[in-house]
Image (tube, rainbow, N blue to C red):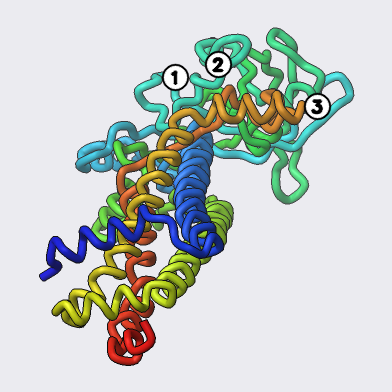
Amino acid sequence: MIRPLALAIAWRYLRAPTRNRFVSFIGLASVVGLALGVASLIVVISVMDGFAAELRDRLLRFDAQVSVVAEDGLRDWREIAEELAALPGVRRVGPVVELEALLVSRRRYAGVQLLGLAADPAMQAAPYSQSVIAGSFADLHTETGGLAVGRYLANTLGVRVGDTVRVLIPRPNGAAPSLRDLLVSAVFVAGNAGPDSSLALAGLPVVSELAGLEGRVSALQVSGSDPYETPALVETWAAGSERVRASALTTRSWMQQHEALFRTVELERLAMGALLFTIIAVAAFNIVATLYMSVNERRSEIAILATLGARTPTIMAVFSLQGLLAGIVGVGLGGALGVWLTLNVDAAMQFLENLFGFDFLPAESFYLTGVPAELTASLVITVTGLALLLSTLASWYPSRQAARVDPASILRYE
């Protein structure tokens, strides 16, 4: 049990200046370093989590959480859609037809992925219409048919809303391609290069006719309340479904489709976290140095405490608590600073941009109006807890050395 005497002495040692100014400087540097390390780690990881969440949201605007794919087309898709819609947590199930197509306009052309969507918004698993910047998705499903293209794709083809684009679908074995002229009815911005430059959307009947599927669909797109749990839910359903085995269906989740991208993001997050954690480790080593020099400077005081009856655990507790209190001060300041900076990251970024005269996140390139940050209580608790644990462990060796001081040899010449 730690006695109040040990706590009082530790607090006095922490506040009282030492005779050696270098020791005081190292002690202050350790607290400041610990605070900066904790603050930096909280801010950087929060911003990286924010960017990962922003990337996920943008991908899910044009990618379903899960796609149930039929290689040769799915005819009885309505029955399967009903089974999927009955799963807990599933919100939307929609049919799509996917094709590789060539778009031609004004002597310009581009290869695209053509996606046919159902007219009913309740059957569209991904919220495509949220990204429209010109025109309307409702015009995709007119009698003549419409076409929605990404912003970069529209620039490549040199078209805008109201222009005509010829759609060519190649046929195997040298057969004549399927042709259809469609009006551009909408232009969208997905926020990433893939859909913006290589995706076109049209009505389901039009694309199904071009593909020659005769009422069949290529896949069923599934959207649920949790994008991380929905893929596992659908895979469990597929593993136990006779209809899935009979139709040779496969499942494809958004995480599988973008696995390399998210692995890279996670690797960068871990690498950055490990790099910034070294700042905390260096600050903890500074605590070791500070306490060790403090022990050497206060050897006579330790000897007096021992002669007055202070036992080894009490002496160890004094310097252990001194290191712990220094850690609490540094971690507390760093945690508060990190949370404040994260909550005001846009203002901090604006200050840096004004200071250096450089736009770190151009809106025309990143489609961002601010710096995304995702601050969680678990992150703050984890970072501050690890930093406090490290600073506490750092004080063990100096406190052990203090307990080994021999009062007789020290006070003999006092």
User: Foreground residue, 116 or 349?
Assistant: 349
Task: Measure how far apart labels 3 and 1 are at the Cα level.
Answer: 27 Å
Q: Quadrant of the C terminus?
A: bottom left
Residue 5 % position (x, y)? 16, 63
Task: Measure how far apart labels 3 and 2 are at the Cα level.
Answer: 21 Å
Q: Residues within 10 Å of mark 1 (few under 14, many from 20)?
A: some
Q: Is residue 162 left or right of residue 120?
A: right
Residue 355 % position (x, y)? 71, 27
Q: Earlier in the sequence, mark 3 or mark 2?
A: 2
Relative vertical location of residue 397 with respect to residue 149 in this rendering, above or below: below
Task: Measure how far apart labels 2 and 1 are at the Cα level.
Answer: 8 Å
Mark linked to residue 140: 2
Q: Residue at x 55, y 31 (%)?
A: 371
Mark linked to residue 156: 3
Check contact, mark 2 vs mark 1: CB within 8 A. Answer: yes
User: Foreground residue, 359 or 230?
Assistant: 359
Amino acid of disc 3: Thr
Q: Residue at x 16, y 77 (%)?
A: 308
Is label 3 or label 1 in front?
3
Mark linked to residue 242: none
Q: Earlier in the sequence, mark 3 or mark 1?
A: 1
Secondary element at image label 1? loop
Check contact, mark 3 vs mark 1: CB within 8 A. Answer: no
Amino acid of disc 2: Leu
